[in-house]
Amino acid sequence: MDKKKDIEQLYFDFPAASANSTEPAKVNPISPADRELIEFVISAACQYFEVDRQQLISEYRMANARHLCYYIIISSTTGVYDYDIGNYFNRKRTAVQYGIGLISSHKNIYRQTLGNLNGIIEIANNLEKKYEWHIPLMTTTH
């Protein structure tokens, strides 16, 4: 087999999440149920924080809301990686990793973080679904 074709199978030829990067973004096949879950988490966060999708993805002041989404998505799916989540939010995988780590530590310290997580989860679970999935409510690990 041709080495170039092998590489093309591993990478999808569209611009990476960052405009400064020249590397193509990685592609990971995500199940339809996980895609729906990701879209519903994003929609639920928009409803919870009363913003539209563009504001959630682009505005600096919405960083915490994005971090909450990253955490919910990574903890509720299998086979979805940081670079996959980054593609949904136009962020690099390191930004996603930072947000997940931040929420992971904050949910055990700040009640508001846990309340925000569960508020988004409740909205996402109540949206009309095509696939069968359910996100359990978060608890502290104390």
Image (cartoon, rainbow, N blue to C red):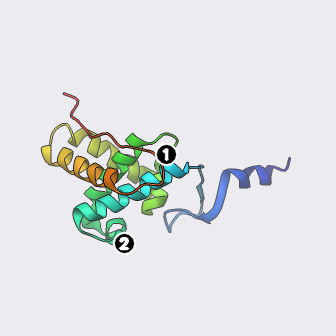
Q: Residue furthest right?
A: 1
Relative height, residue 109 to residue 82 (above, below): above
Residue 112 rendering spot, x and y as whole percentages? 14, 48
Residue position for label 1: 81
**Of residues 75 and 90, the one drawn nearer to the viewer in this rendering:** 75
- Between the C-alphas of marks 1 and 2, the distance is 22 Å
Residue type for callout 2: Gln
Residue at the (31%, 59%) spot, across then down: 44
Question: Could you say whether the residue bearing mark 1 is in a helix, strand or loop?
Answer: loop
Residue highlighted by disc 2? 54
Residue at the spot x=23%, y=29% of the render? Answer: 141
Which of the marked residues, 1 or 2, is nearer the chain's N terminus? 2
Percent position of residue 108, x then y: 19, 36
Q: Is residue 89 left or right of residue 25?
A: left
Disc 2 secondary structure class: helix
Pinpoint residue 63: horizontal percent, then vertical percent. Answer: 29, 60
Q: Amino acid at mark 1?
A: Tyr
Residue 14, located in which quarter of the rendered image?
bottom right
